Amino acid sequence: MLTTSPAAPLPERLACMAADLRSLIAECNPDAVAVERIFFQTNVRTAISVAQASGVALAIAAAAGCEVAQYTPNEVKQAVAGYGAATKEQVQRMVTTQLGLAERPRPVDAADALALALCHLTVAPRLKRWEEAGR
Amino acid sequence: MLTTSPAAPLPERLACMAADLRSLIAECNPDAVAVERIFFQTNVRTAISVAQASGVALAIAAAAGCEVAQYTPNEVKQAVAGYGAATKEQVQRMVTTQLGLAERPRPVDAADALALALCHLTVAPRLKRWEEAGR
């Protein structure tokens, strides 16, 4: 997990996240990057900085030439737990089982990130088949 | 003004904006970059992508070592037109006068950007004096 100092000003935290994410992509060379799609139903204050961070992630993934996919939290839960309103705990359990992990990934954010990746692995080939069938 | 193709997917538009902004900062070597502070009172759909773009701008300005300042639209209007609820037209007129331009900057977004820069030039030294006085 990438973390930044909560004490640092927001522009510096975003710059730090950008640099770390760029290094991580260079190191892992992923084909695709999945980013949670942002909605503003709940906490508007938090949502702004989350959207700003997601913008940085999208820009860096695209600049690195990765395929970039976005999924809503409900799409992730549906894909991973078979149920769009699954609880955090159900998602954690499914991620643990599907990846054959010895124990649940901690913190919860890490489980969410793994669920997002699993969602992409499930949904992307299906979308591709639909796209090909529609031609 | 930096523009991106409206037809391109969002991650690519953000990556394109990031590259253009990085070049512009390298070319102009500014001491400071002022970015509009985002609020979500009106159009939530637009606000998400605006916040994502602002996150990219903040990260790039900070990574380039620039001082980064954020102002709300009301702070900008107050600083430039002396009135927080000034109309777009009043702001355009004040920007034209203060910068001694032959005609109003077009499009309106360019006038807004110039107003933001003028706001920073007005407010930043005052904030600095307050800060120094408080020591």
Image: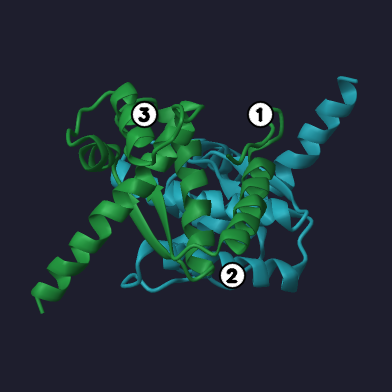
Chain colours: A cyan, B green
List x then y, in percent, for residue A46. 33, 49
C-alpha separation, residue under disc 1 versus residue under disc 3: 26 Å
Badge nearest the viewer, 1 or 3 = 3
Q: Is residue A28 visible?
A: yes
Residues packed near mark 2 inside 10 Å, few (<14), some (14 to 19) or many (20 plus) = some
The residue that appears at 38% across and 74% down in the rendered structure is A5
List x then y, in percent, for residue B90. 29, 25
Residues packed near mark 1 inside 10 Å, few (<14), some (14 to 19) or many (20 plus) = few
The residue identified by callout 2 is: A19
How many discs appear?
Answer: 3
Q: Is residue A85 visible?
A: no
The residue that appears at 47% across and 47% down in the rendered structure is B54
Looking at this rendering, what residue extends furthest in the bottom direction? B135
Chain letter of the residue carrying label 1:
B
Disc sitting over residue B6 in the figure: 1
The residue that appears at 61% across and 41% down in the rendered structure is B2
Q: Quadrant of the C terminus of chain A?
A: top right
The residue that appears at 67% across and 54% down in the rendered structure is B19
> Is A10 above or below relative to A49?
below
Question: Quick check: marks 1 and 3 in contact, CB under 8 Å?
Answer: no
C-alpha separation, residue under disc 1 versus residue under disc 2: 27 Å
Give the residue type at disc 2: Ala
Residues packed near mark 3 inside 10 Å, few (<14), some (14 to 19) or many (20 plus) = many
The residue identified by callout 3 is: B92
Location of residue B85 (image quadrant): top left
Give the residue type at disc 1: Pro
